[in-house]
Image (cartoon, rainbow, N blue to C red):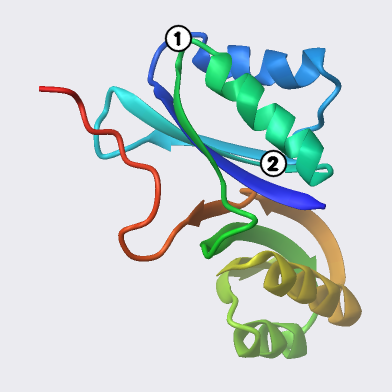
Amino acid sequence: MRHIISMLMQNEAGALVRVAGMFSQRGFNIESLNVAPTEDDTVSRLTLVTTGSDDVVDQINRQLLKLVDVIDVLDMTGGEHVESELVMMKVAGDDRLAEQARAAGAEVLDARDGLFTLRFVGGESAVRDLIDSMSGVGTLRELVRSGAVAITPGDLGLRYEQEQ
């Protein structure tokens, strides 16, 4: 099963290496990974996608919390969350491709040399649908995906509040 795990960690040199190393040492795969500073520039939010049973992911979460730089961990898969991914692609095709891309919610960033450069933001299934759709009307030449980022709605979620 696919899991989206989000964590807060100290924005320190080597913190990401320790997280990736923990996955590697235990034979867990990371499908996608995003890291960026939060509203507090001393803290980063890392969002990753991995696969495994609920028991395996519970083990991952427990191991992550043992890492010195990790502040908090949340497996968003079981709860309500909003998920999105940025995709950019170059597709060879004709004007019909551009029309279909726009109809699917993609933005045409550039059109030259017989290639359309598209940008799309959406959930995992919408991204897959767009890729399949564009492959059906043109030739996919290059694909760049950010991987998933996710946030919980309302007052739920991960927040770092420094002790005063």
Q: CA distance from mark 1 to mark 2?
A: 20 Å
Residue appearing at x 85%, y 74% in the figure: 132
Q: Nearer the viewer, residue 64 or 87?
A: 64
Residue corresponding to mark 2: 32
Residue corresponding to mark 1: 13
Q: Quadrant of the C terminus?
A: top left
Query: Residue 155 location, x and y as percent?
Result: 31, 59
Is the C-beta separation of discs 1 and 2 under 8 Å?
Answer: no
Dot 2 crowding, Cα within 10 Å, few <14, some 14–19, many 20+: some
Q: Is residue 19 above or below residue 119?
A: above
Q: Is residue 95 above or below residue 38?
A: below
Query: Residue 133 location, x and y as percent?
Result: 81, 79
Q: Is residue 105 above or below residue 87?
A: below
Residue type for callout 2: Ser
Query: Residue 163 location, x and y as percent?
Result: 17, 23
Q: Is residue 38 above or below residue 94?
A: above
Can residue 114 be seen? no
Residue type for callout 1: Ala
Residue appearing at x 64%, y 59% in the figure: 88
Whether residue 119 sits left or right of residue 31 in the image: it is: left
Q: Nearer the viewer, residue 7 or 32?
A: 7
Residue appearing at x 39%, y 43% in the figure: 158
Whether residue 106 sits left or right of residue 1 in the image: it is: left
Q: Quadrant of residue 161?
A: top left
Precedes in sequence: disc 1 or disc 2: 1
Residue appearing at x 79%, y 38% in the figure: 55
Q: Quadrant of residue 67?
A: top right
